Amino acid sequence: EIVLTQSPATLSLSPGERASLSCRASQSVSNYLAWYQQKPGQAPRLLIYDASNRATGIPARFSGSGSGTDFTLTISSLEPEDFAVYYCQQRSVWPPVFTFGPGTKVHIK
Amino acid sequence: EVQLVESGGTLVQPGGSLKLSCAASGFTVSNNYMSWVRQAPGKGLEWVSLIYIAGSTYYADSVKGRFTISRDSSKNTLSLQMNSLRAEDSGVYYCARVPQDTTMVYFDYWGQGTLVTVSS
């Protein structure tokens, strides 16, 4: 079973700053990695799929990079609405099991 | 517009059963992989189950043998039958769509969730 590890667990930043969130897989997942944003009381929202593709309607300040075991979600300049929890996720080929990382909480400094 | 609306969550006693439903609009459930994902209070996301277009079903080890995913093409709905419920099954349950004609390894649309509480 592939395990996803996210770091840091918490990130304290100010609006306008750059955020870099890391996701590491216990074995290679190629580029089959997604990122989600979740705000309190809301469902997760897809941000990035296949490691680096922005989902429909996602602002350009969000970008994803990486392949194999190391991935990064970057928010170039934090907006007030970006303070939330971010999860990475992968799916193993067989059996089809989806795994989420434990999340990184980005909060206002 | 794609929409997913879950229902059926409630308070249930340990050992009890519950059936969740997810009504879809804007697309056809039977033409997509569909999943259930849950989130315990204050915790992260946990994948629960998946149903393929062909009807094959898959489950997380934590629910295997107790939960059953299914769909009703006539109503365009997804369901999750949950039996032998435990306290650790408590949380918000989301239905989510895996988009077709893609790598099919992520969820592009999610419902708002329905809360299940297992407690005596």
Image: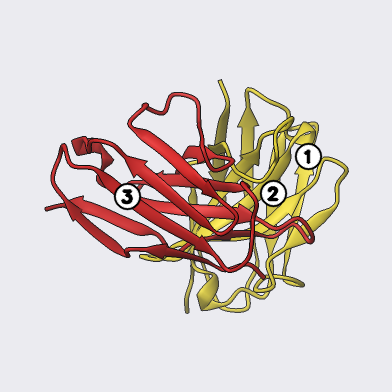
Chain colours: A red, B yellow
Three-letter amino acid code of the residue under disc 1: Asp
* Quadrant hosting residue B40: bottom left
Report the side of B82 relative to A65 (left or right): right
Work out whether mark 2 precedes mark 1 in sequence or the reverse, and give the earlier one. Answer: 1
Q: How far apart, in angstroms, are the residues tagged by discs 2 and 1? A: 8 Å
Q: Quadrant of the N terminus of chain A?
A: bottom right
Q: Which residue is mark 1?
A: B72
Query: Residues at badges 3 and 2 in contact (C-beta under 8 Å)?
Result: no
Instruction: Return the chain for callout 2.
Output: B
Query: Residues at badges 2 and 1 in contact (C-beta under 8 Å)?
Result: yes
The spot of residue B50 in percent (x, y) is 72, 52
Q: Which residue is mark 2?
A: B79
* Quadrant hosting residue B77: top right
Report the side of A73 relative to A76 (left or right): right
Q: How far apart, in angstroms, are the residues tagged by discs 3 and 2? A: 38 Å
Instruction: Return the chain for callout 3.
Output: A
The spot of residue A52 in percent (x, y) is 51, 38
Q: How far apart, in angstroms, are the residues tagged by discs 3 and 1? A: 42 Å
Query: Residues at badges 3 and 1 in contact (C-beta under 8 Å)?
Result: no
User: Which residue: 44% across, 62% down?
Assistant: B44
